[in-house]
Amino acid sequence: MNYLIEVEVKAKIKDFESIKSKLKKINALKTKEEYQRDVYFNSPIKDFAKSDEALRIRKISNKNENKTFITYKGPKIDSSSKTREEIEIAIDESNQISQLFENLGFKKGKTVVKNREFYQLNEYIITLDDVKGLGPYMEIEVELMDNNDYKLALDEIFKIFKKLGIEDGFERKSYLELLEIESNHLSIK
């Protein structure tokens, strides 16, 4: 059975402007900008934080359109990236789906809000993410139909980061996890 594997690496960056000029130098082309609002849900059967899974409803807005998706992300499959199975379905009625999830016992969790710029470099998608409450991050990803070649793709992603002058600051946690950590730090102070 074939399924989609999202090979993804994320890094905290200092600023967007220096990265944008480096993206231009390696011929990465800006493709679009969008606002994303992700509402996460936790299962009544198992704790997604413990099983390393995610279920969300993502609303996307840009100057041309508005779209909504349900996304399931499986557990990460290695120790150096965020590579995992992903299933995404376009939907029309996010409020009704949210209510359906809640009626089935799913608990609504945190919301992650970000402005995202997309760049394309061959088959790789590079995003610059301004995440509310976290600041600037960059992700590089590619989608594969199975996980047979994910290690080659992962090597290429790290080569792209190196070309952009990024050799540390890599983060395996999701934005949701990082916001939870940030929230806990603030409540301790």
Image (tube, rainbow, N blue to C red):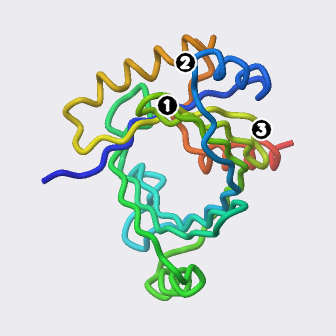
* 65 lies left or right of 156: right
Residue 14 horizontal/vertical position (percent): 77, 23
Quadrant where the C terminus is found in the figure:
top right
Q: How far apart are marks 3 and 1 (CA)?
A: 17 Å
Q: Residue 138 carries which label?
A: none
Q: Is mark 3 on a helix, strand or loop?
A: strand
| Disc 2 target residue | 161
Which one is in front, 41 or 98?
A: 98
| Disc 3 target residue | 135
Which one is in front, 131 or 122?
A: 122
Residue at x 64% of width, y 15% of height: 25
N-terminal of the two: label 3 or label 1? Answer: 1
N-terminal of the two: label 3 or label 2? Answer: 3
Q: Is mark 2 on a helix, strand or loop?
A: helix
Quick check: marks 1 and 2 in contact, CB under 8 Å?
yes
Total marks placed: 3
The answer to whether 73 is drawn above or below residue 159 in the figure is below
Q: What element carries label 1?
A: strand
* 146 lies left or right of 183: left
| Disc 1 target residue | 9
